[in-house]
Image (cartoon, rainbow, N blue to C red):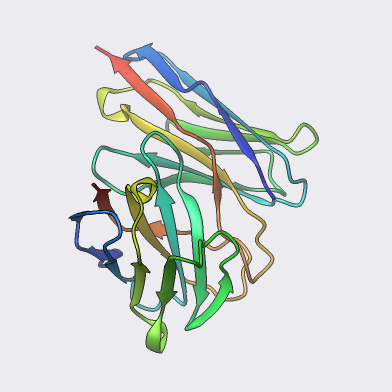
Amino acid sequence: EAGVAQSPRYKIIEKRQSVAFWCNPISGHATLYWYQQILGQGPKLLIQFQNNGVVDDSQLPKDRFSAERLKGVDSTLKIQPAKLEDSAVYLCASSFGTSGPYNEQFFGPGTRLTVL
Amino acid sequence: GENVEQHPSTLSVQEGDSAVIKCTYSDSASNYFPWYKQELGKGPQLIIDIRSNVGEKKDQRIAVTLNKTAKHFSLHITETQPEDSAVYFCAASIQLGGADGLTFGKGTHLIIQP
């Protein structure tokens, strides 16, 4: 079974530029998550989708971050404009269920963003 | 919201010895507690998890215990091997359907000394 795919794996941009990350979850997984992992810390949830609807975006900095999951499969996370503190690894995860409980989350390899 | 504390931040053990990592959580409604292993340049990999209706779970050399009253849970690795060297994260979530994103601890860097 193929895992969660993410691209690009690495991205370097200058502050105030925009950037987008792409995620393809495990086939059949209805729920998709984006996490931000700053160096030396645990991942922090940014947004959760069930199919193509947002379930939780309470920790998403909406003035600069946006995400979408068209057709309930792939997802894109965008940052515009980027700040220095956005330098982190952006992880995508997916899980099978929509109604819980106990849905295991499977993570992709992440996209490492460096903002100069 | 949920807060997860994890200790120690770094743990060095001799190969063959046991390692224990401890976590506490703040929200008594949390009912799902996974542990992830993260190797350099890779995403977190689920190694074991425990639900709130279970006190202990084992999988070969790995075990997890949960004390709901004290709101803490621990990861135990026995007979450690060099390939166990990695960063380990505990996490907690409320899984009742709907929003079930994980709240992670800050991680433990486990070093296995040969």
Tag count: 0
Q: Residue at x 26, y 50 (%)?
A: A115
Quarter of the image for residue A92 reads: bottom left
Depicted B48 relative to depicted B72: above or below: below
Q: Is residue B29 left or right of residue A60?
A: right
For this orientation, the residue located farthest to the right is B69
Residue B2 position within the rendered picture, expressed as x and y whole percent measured from the top left: 67, 47
The answer to which image quadrant residue A76 occupies is: bottom left
Between residue A36 and residue B32, name the one nearer to us: A36
Q: Position of residue B93 (x, y in %)?
A: 62, 53
Where A85 sits versus A67, above or below? Answer: above
Q: Residue at x 35, y 69 (%)?
A: A78
The answer to whether A115 appears left or right of A66 in the picture is left
**Residue at far front of view:** A16
Please name whichever residue, A52 or A26, is drawn nearer the observer in this view of the structure. A52
Camera-nearest residue between A86 and B103: A86
Horizontally, is B28 left or right of B33 in the view? right
Which quadrant of the figure contains the C terminus of chain B?
A: top left
Q: Is residue B44 above or below residue B65?
A: below
Residue placed at 43% from the left, 65% from the top? A64
**Where is A81 relative to B90, above or below?**
below
User: Residue A102's spot in the image, x, y percent?
Assistant: 59, 60
Residue A7, quarter of the rendered image: bottom left
